[in-house]
Image (cartoon, rainbow, N blue to C red):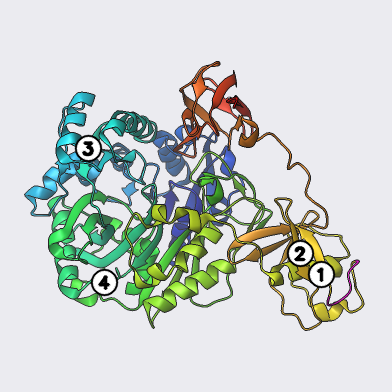
Amino acid sequence: MISKLLIANRGEIACRIIRTAREMGIATVAVYSDADAKALHVRQADEAVHIGPSPAAESYLVGEKIIAAAKQTGAKAIHPGYGFLSENAGFAQAVIDAGLIWVGPKPSSIDAMGLKDAAKKLMREAGVPVTPGYEGEDQSVERLKKEADAIGYPVLIKAVAGGGGKGMRKVDKAENFEADLESCRREAKASFSNDEVLLEKWITSPRHIEVQVFGDSHGNVVHLFERDCSLQRRHQKVIEEAPAPGMDEATREEICAAAVRAAKAVDYEGAGTIEFIADASEGLRADRIFFMEMNTRLQVEHPVTEEITGVDLVEWQLRVASGEPIPLQQDELSINGWAIEARLYAEDPAKGFLPSTGRLEICDLDPPFPFVRVETGVDVGGEITPYYDPMIAKVIVWSDHSREEAVSDLATALCECAVWPVSTNLGFLVRLLEQERFYEFDLDTGFIDQNLESLVARPAPHQVALQTAWSVFAKADHSFDTRQENVASVNSLQGFRLNADRNSTAVLFDQFGQAQRFEVPEDDQLLMKAYTAGTSVIVPDSGFQYAFSLTPPIGLGAASAADGAILAPMPGKVIAVDVAEGDAVTAGQRLMVLEAMKMEHALTAPFDGTVTELSAATGGQVQVEAVLAVVEPKEE
């Protein structure tokens, strides 16, 4: 067995691997960049080695530094986690050549599945059904456009390398193809250093079904059943669950058998995932499920498989990498209950899901329920930086009773989480889980986009949330300690009026400057969880975070799109500028593209008008809220 393990990753997955390694008696080594010097994974590991500046390209993506750190600390093996170098065959080979154990599939298997076009050809030969499309070597715009026209719109453009929804675009009309292709290639080049693409027919009622597979060096390959990852935004998974709703035993047997054939075709070892797209217009049927790609690594959503099978997939990885056979054979594996996972991100759904950065003054991710599992890489005082993926945590729930109970319990658990002042998708996730169509699973991968407006709308705070904040102001006598939790009891506040009589109404202001009127609470009023930060009281309400104060917050009159000022929504790099000073623009027209947190964000004109100022230039780095351009409205 491995005696010391270096984890070539960061955040929640590094913490997840450290936990299992510790349970197995394996010493751990973390690596970190400048931005992660005080990160949770660094503090949890037995040792930690600094590997460079904050940008991943200068630290976590530099294989030589990681191998050197392993040699320096005497680590015997390297676990890549997911993302970064986890599917880099060259790095895997370099680890092996250095005399270290690579906790992952053989480099040849990574190579075989690393490019989606080559993988699809290989799968056809292995008898695995694949999606109709184009995977040719001719990458000219003219050829790709011709093939897309022949396939028929909508069509999906996909980068042949990488994953995670990057380098993917759905094209609805022929006239949009070239612009979407350019954007897709640019994002793929930045993320994977490869701008080649393939085309696939867009399935009109698609569900994303994937199968967890596992192989060892003794020729054994098993599956651990399927997961459903259909709830996505911009091809990025949001909610994942296992088993897949509506999956009958016959279809499950066929899709899982196809996944095992796929793994055996590349002589697979370790944890991997075979991803399928299903045409669910007539329910799940084996003849309407097509291979998309293979992820040759541990998946973000692996906990739901662990919850329904009772297997620790990281433990299996470490045992198989040490030369042991898979601990269980296929007939020893079974499904028990239902599990569902939500990805909690630092992003603002109300602003197009733009990533949010900053210090976590409040970070309460420990719902008081035994059925909840939380995987996180941050805690109070931690920083969400612009350098990496903005995931804060994964919240997982298991139920042995029903899928409906698991869904309800997850919504309840998310309502108990609190994060401040970084914006999150907590409220969005709760709204999503409460949809009647979600309970019935009458949905597909387009569900979020189809219902986006209602899902991101912020509701008015409930009366009890305002009353809770009011009670905390009374109890604390207006003096707060940042991050202090206050769950106040009104019974202790008798006689306190704060300029309002009991049974009368009062007003507090939320973080948007909106006056919120409410009834002053009675003595026996039940209150919610609340926190203090600065001079505000933070109350989580149905997943949404409200900051209440006695006076309107300052700084709400800054320049915004309503004034025609185009502000940088986050720190990032300007990768395209489409206009010049003096240009006439129309509402919604793209002005420029900002790259941050490995994703592209288009900034558009707020109304018809003229570009009167332009300070952004291609290649320039910008800070949050920097004025990049000004559009003067068209005269009526």
CA distance separating discs 1 and 4? 50 Å
Q: Is residue 514 left or right of residue 535?
A: left
Q: Which mark is residue 246?
A: 4
x%, y% of residue 145?
21, 30
For label 4, the SS is loop
Quarter of the picture holding the C terminus: top right
Q: Nearer the viewer, mark 1 or mark 4?
A: 1
CA distance separating discs 3 and 2? 55 Å
CA distance separating discs 3 and 4? 30 Å
Q: Which mark is residue 198?
A: 3
Q: Nearer the viewer, mark 2 or mark 4?
A: 2
x%, y% of residue 599?
44, 38
Residue with the mark numbered 1: 505
Q: Are marks 2 and 1 in contact (CB under 8 Å)?
A: yes
x%, y% of residue 614?
58, 20
Give the magenta-colored segment's residue range. Answer: 499-503
Q: Earlier in the sequence, mark 3 or mark 2?
A: 3
The amino acid sitting under disc 2 is: Arg
Q: Is residue 584 above or below residue 270?
A: above
Quarter of the picture holding the N terminus: bottom left
For label 2, the SS is strand
